[in-house]
Amino acid sequence: MRDKGMKGTLYIVSTPIGNLEDITLRALRVLKEVDVIAAEDTRHSAKLLNHYGIAKPMISYWGEKEKVRSEEIIGRLHSGQSVALISDAGTPGISDPGSVLIQRTIEEGMDIVPIPGPSALTAAISISGLRIKEFIFVGFLPPKKSQRQKALNDLAAEKRTMVFYEAPHRILETIGDMNDIFGERGAVVVKEITKLYEEVLRGSLSEITDMLYEKTIAGEYVVLVEGKGMGDASPEEALLEVKSLMKKGRGRKEAVKLVAGQYGLSKKDLYDRSLVDET
């Protein structure tokens, strides 16, 4: 079924964050039907479009070009053309360019249609194993150390789980700063999500720091950190969770590691308590 009134419409199309199979049928149809595709990087997006046999004119709107190209795209919309906005990965406007064009389209009173799809944010949350009733999406922290530490200090009292994006060349410094400022909290780091070398690290911030030093640093990272007080659970509650995981088939060490990471507890202490509790 076609979207109603494609002419003069801006489509915000989510594209794969790694695996090219992670794209919806609707997204593919819209990309084939629009008059032009506005891409963050036309060379990068050409790989996706070529993979699915989509041949459409493209406009690049990355970086400094975003403001100027937004006006060009607005002109196309006014002339009755339909435009699909895509980023290099995921959804435009979320830690990616696109917000300038979206705001201008709203100001012009023109139609905007979301075409939802892949999201590193929700994918990472879904496999984290953390107790997430609420979360706050922070995105990328400032690249400069002093500004990054200030941002983290401002978040130190946050009670909700925090979700960050981070680049490979800053991941070690960022996790180190988080450990210094937040202390021993449970955390999860997801590397290269949906890609060939996808990897998930779980534990306390200091444990994850040690893990990262033993890993090859590459690709984009999603970092989830428990909020203040989320690890404040009684030993009894932690032991109950260990028992529950063991009844479901997890080994004692694995169950203890998972629960200790979630609660920000010492793995050794929790392991010893689990042994004593069975005697």
Image (cartoon, helix red, strand yellow):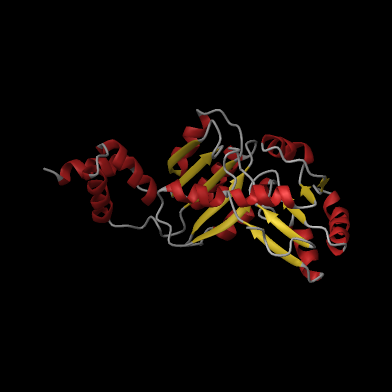
Determine if residue 86 is in view.
no
Query: Residue 145 at what x, y percent from top left?
Result: 66, 46
Give me the residue at 76% from left, 52% from top. 34
Query: Residue 227 at what x, y percent from top left?
Result: 47, 57
- Please identify the quadrant where the C terminus is shown: top left
Quadrant of res 41: top right
Query: Residue 274 at what x, y percent from top left?
Result: 21, 44
Query: Residue 196 at what x, y percent from top left?
Result: 54, 31
In this picture, residue 72 sits left or right of residue 166:
right
Determine if residue 200 is in view.
yes
- 95 versus 47 height, above or below: below
Give me the residue at 53% from left, 58% from top. 156
Of residues 158 and 43, which is closer to you in this image?
Answer: 43
The residue positioned farthest toward the left in the image shown: 279
- Please identify the quadrant where the N terminus is shown: bottom right
Give me the residue at 74% from left, 55% from top. 98
Number of on-image labels: 0
Give me the residue at 47% from left, 33% from top. 211
Quadrant of res 254: top left
In this picture, residue 278 sits left or right of residue 166:
left
Of residues 125 and 232, which is closer to you in this image?
Answer: 125
Of residues 158 and 67, which is closer to you in this image?
Answer: 67
In this picture, residue 237 sits left or right of residue 179:
left
